[in-house]
Image (tube, grey):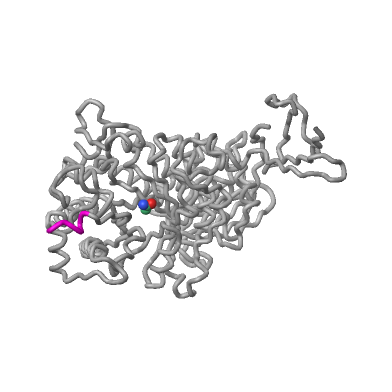
Amino acid sequence: IGMCLCAHPINAQSVIPVPLKMEQGTGSFLLSEKTKLYTNLQGEEAILLGDYLKTALPVQFKEGKKKDKQNVLSLLITEKKPQLVSPESYILSVTPEHILIQASSGAGLFYGIQTLLQLSQPSDTGYSIASVEVQDTPRFAYRGMMLDVPRHFFSKEFVKKQIDALAFYKLNRLHLHLTDAAGWRLEIKKYPLLTEFAAWRTDANWKKWWNGGRKYLRFDEPGASGGYYTQDDMKEIIAYAQQHYITIIPEIEMPAHSEEVLAAYPQLSCSGEPYKNADFCVGNEETFTFLENVLTEVMELFPSEYIHVGGDEAGKAAWKTCPKCQARIKALGIKGDKKHSAEAYLQSFIITHAEKFLNGKGRQIIGWDEILEGGLAPNSTVMSWRGESGGIEAAKQHHDVIMSPNTYLYFDYYQSKDVEQEPEAIGGYLPLERVYSYEPMPASLTPEEQKYIKGVQANLWTEYIPTFSQVEYMELPRMAALADIQWTNPEHKDYQDFLQRLVRMVKIYDVYQYNYAKHVFDVTARFEPNAETGTVDVTLSTVDNCPVYYTLDGTDPTTASQLYTEPVKINT
Ligand code: ACM
């Protein structure tokens, strides 16, 4: 029994994420070389948005005017519509005469364009779009995806392709985990060894490197494997993201996951030696100078209000015996208590220090939920990854929260139980249906506390993901489920309906050459013992009701094999 993806008509309901309101009309708009394009958007943004549209729907638009009523695609900034509740809201009207997208900002127009793209069907003269009226607005303001680039480095070009995928699903944050033991990935002019040394290791494959000594090499030594983004590369990525209304959130890890820094600059570790520690020495003033200098260059580069400072999985063991760290604890008057060790309070101290520094420059911090331990820095946003409890606790403390629980949204986990057939993954099991079922608003919070849940993010850690195509395989189609979680009103979420929309979506993956997992298109078999006939009755189905062919002699079926029409009765 084979996997099946058969030809499917496009219908106007096939939008992911599901819009707030969508009504089909009659007839279609035919987009062609004769179609005029008009916008009242001004300046650079108008040019970029027009260019984006012309690339996405490659027809030679004619220049339109405000008074054009026939065969025109209009992108209109309007302030007065009550339906446009956020800058990201839009109204899309398609009639046989016109396509009209209205929004109060370029972002809203951009999301209207995304919906339009999903509804566009190639035709002889260009594209055909069925008449429809869409009124749409996102549920969450923060809609993120994280990519881990230290464990395996991914090129600037691939990051741009990732941005395309995020934009398609109306995500608006790409969190780049830029630094970790496996490699520092961002040029910092003040600390050249970060990219001449800490960005290069003895093995291209993370697992081999991790199990084989975890050593770094200078970039010009034989066998050095790795890479990094120059500041110019990163400017290019940021600009590309901005054109897609996506903010890049940089993550600079502290105080842990910092073996690579401490190999390059061992004076920042408790032991003073490379390859001994994972955590920065918090007793050493130079650690703070280093972090401030790095964050200064990061802020010059990234316009994001939020800078992610990591904070996860600090062992803190070396701090217990480090004279400098212990002197710091004493000087600060820190005492361990029933809730937290003195070292946990020291972790809070370094995160709070980074926060003060960043707040002083008008920026805010996000940290993994361990930043709760030892007390949250006053203005910090918590990214809840160890399930939802950290997020719930932070919301109760009136801190903003991004939900990215590993129990639903770690896309490095297996998506099938048949792991023999899967590329090796880190473990876990998060099939599409489980991801789709995630409801980010904890019922245990009061309505007042729920307001602190600002958004949702999925994370892709890449220890076991060395290639672009495997990144896409782990993300797609789970990212489509993520989009419905982030954007769509929960009343409009329906897994069976989602699967139907997905059938259409994979055709678009093929067009844009995205790799994706196909488990949901497998033939599902149900086996039922039938007491009356003494048989086992086998029912076969697919999400898209494709014809199924089968054999009973163990050979691979072809389209010449038996066509499935009714339950197969097995009597031997
Ligand atoms: C994490 O997965 N360590 C945030």
Q: Residue at x 70, y 26 (%)?
A: 554
Q: How many circles with numbers are drawn on the protein?
A: 0
Residue placed most toward the observer, 72 or 218 = 218
Q: Is residue 294 left or right of residue 238?
A: left
Choose between 85 and 460: the one closer to the eye: 460
Q: Position of residue 254 (x, y in %)?
A: 25, 54
Q: For residue 43, say whether it is visible.
A: no
**Closest to the observer, 62 or 428:** 428
Residue 313 pos. (x, y %): 32, 54
| Residue lying furthest right | 532
Task: Report whether residue 414 is seen.
Answer: yes
Q: Residue 403 colored magenta?
A: no
Q: Nearer the viewer, residue 554 or 441?
A: 554
Question: Above or below — where is 548 with respect to 36?
Answer: above
Choose top left, top right, bottom left or bottom right for residue 295. Answer: bottom left
Q: Quadrant of the C terminus?
A: top right
Q: Residue at x 50, y 54 (%)?
A: 408
| Residue 238 in the image, given as x and y percentages of width and height | 32, 47
Secondary structure mostly seen in the magenta stretch: helix
Left or right, 111 with reference to 238: right
Query: Is residue 565 left or right of 445 when viewed as pictured?
Result: right
Q: Magenta span covers which residues?
A: 318-323
Q: Position of residue 515 (x, y in %)?
A: 50, 36
Q: Residue at x 36, y 61 (%)?
A: 369
Where's the N terminus, which quadrant? top right
Residue 121 found in image quarter: top right
